[in-house]
Image: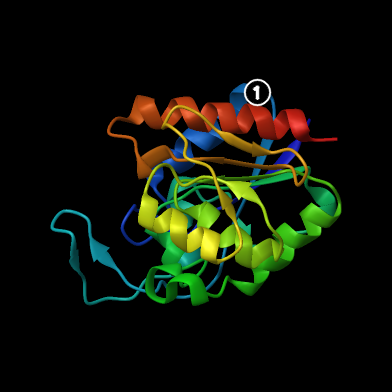
Amino acid sequence: MKRVGVVLSGCGVYDGSEIHEAVITLLALARAGAEAVCFAPDKPQADVINHLTNEPAIEGRNVLVEAARITRGVIAPLEKADASQLDALIVPGGFGAAKNLSNFASSGTQCLVDSELRRLARELHAQGKPLGFICIAPAMLPKILDMPVRLTIGTDIDLAEMLEEMGAEHVPCPVEDIVVDEEHKVVTTPAYMLATRIDEAATGIEKLVSRVLDLCA
């Protein structure tokens, strides 16, 4: 059974992992007969958003504790992730990818990526294992891999230009499809960068999961 690391960034589209993207990823892995091994950084969230009003909330939350809501408590601190025990890595999107796994939301092309995520992804890449990044999460790839990589965040021209400034080769992609960098074993899909319904997001994510598993050695 293939063991796939899934890195979450909290719980909720505006301040953590996009819940639909995370759950679809976990479901697709289970249906494919793979084991999802979930991780999240054990640190405070960058901010907390009231998802009913979309307004900032005056409270603090922990990324790992919030992500545990999605995984029914079966999750470990990201610092505990061991690349040698995994066959691949998938990172769902949501604003948490740009706020908690990196500071792309505030720093753009000058962003920094969480050191433990960078370590894990680079170790897996060095071992020839595939990476799947969903929605806005691919924006971290140029800073993680430090090399040109083909990827997509959908069709947003301004964001695409930012990613190309960071060294990526951006490929426009419809919501139901994926972009595969065969050389670097990197798979990306737009999901809720473009999706207006959960089934639209699911189509691309399911393709991404399937391709990531196919790329496992």
User: Which residue shows up at 45% across the image and 69% down it?
Assistant: 104
Most extreme residue toward the left is 53
Q: Quadrant of the C terminus?
A: top right
* Residue 57 x %, y %: 21, 71
Q: From what the image shows, is residue 214 above or below residue 46?
A: above
Q: From what the image shows, is residue 141 above or below residue 205?
A: below
Q: Is mark 1 on a helix, strand or loop?
A: loop
- Label 1 neighbourhood size at 10 Å, few (<14), some (14-19), many (20+)? some
User: Which residue shows up at 74% across the image and 28% down it?
Assistant: 214
Q: Is residue 77 visible?
A: no
The foreground one among 172 and 101 is 172
User: Which residue shows up at 41% across the image and 57% down it?
Assistant: 159
The foreground one among 96 and 38 is 96
The residue beneath circle 1 is 32
* Residue 188 x %, y %: 57, 42
Q: Quadrant of the N terminus?
A: top right
The foreground one among 66 and 179 is 179
Q: Quadrant of residue 166?
A: bottom right
* Residue 128 x %, y %: 84, 47
Q: From what the image shows, is residue 133 above or below residue 122?
A: above
Amino acid carrying mark 1 in the image: Ala
Q: Quadrant of residue 95?
A: bottom left
Determine whether, in the image, residue 214 is placed left or right of residue 139.
Answer: right
Q: From what the image shows, is residue 64 above or below residue 44?
A: above
Q: Is residue 141 visible?
A: yes
Q: Quadrant of residue 198?
A: top left
* Residue 212 x %, y %: 68, 35
